[in-house]
Amino acid sequence: MARRPVQPYQQPAVEPEIIPPDHHGSAWDARTAPPGGFFGVRYGERVYTARVSPIGLGLFAALAVLLVIAVVVLLISALVIWIPIIALLVFGGVIANWLRRHFVRPPL
């Protein structure tokens, strides 16, 4: 295997930036804006969007309607589950009242 010749040490063109330990690696944190603001070169990228066709709009509307129907069905089913529970509680109260009247001793 051929050895590469050893290159002489070259001085770097730019010195590295020394960041203190208590400072985060970025130039800004959650309380301050970036140095150039949000309208600098970094944030000026183009965003491409597509036109929505009538079919796509119809599909989106159908999806929204299906989601609303699903939520309504879930709410109604949650209410329907409570109907037998409340009926059992009322029926148990009626039976307990009848038993209490039937088995209580008359006062002397």
Image: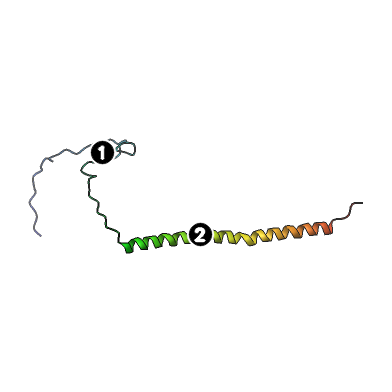
Q: How many marks?
A: 2
The answer to whether residue 68 is left or right of residue 7 is right
Q: Position of residue 62 (x, y in %)?
A: 40, 63
Viewer-nearest of labels 1 and 2? 2
Above or below — where is 24 with respect to 4?
above
Do the CB atoms of the residues marked 1 and 2 lie less than 8 Å apart?
Answer: no
Q: Nearer the viewer, residue 58 or 8?
A: 58
Q: Nearer the viewer, residue 56 or 29?
A: 56
Task: Give the mark nearer the N terminus: 1 vs 2.
Answer: 1
**Type of the residue with mark 2:** Val
The colour scheme is rainbow
Q: Which residue is mark 2?
A: 72
Q: Residues within 10 Å of mark 1 (few under 14, many from 20)?
A: few
| Residue that protrudes farthest toward the right in the picture | 108
Q: Which residue is rendered at x = 33% and y = 64% of the image?
A: 55
Q: Residues within 10 Å of mark 2 (few under 14, many from 20)?
A: few
What numbered label is drawn on residue 37? 1
Q: Position of residue 43 (x, y in %)?
A: 24, 44
Spatial CA span between label 1 and label 2: 46 Å
Q: Which residue is rendered at x = 50% and y = 59% of the image?
A: 72
Q: Which quarter of the rendered picture does the N terminus lie within?
A: bottom left
**Type of the residue with mark 1:** Gly
Q: Nearer the viewer, residue 32 or 7?
A: 32
Q: Secondary structure at mark 2?
A: helix
Q: Position of residue 92 (x, y in %)?
A: 72, 59
Q: Position of residue 108 (x, y in %)?
A: 92, 51
Q: Quadrant of residue 78?
A: bottom right
What numbered label is drawn on residue 56? none
Q: Which residue is rendered at x = 36% and y = 63% of the image?
A: 59
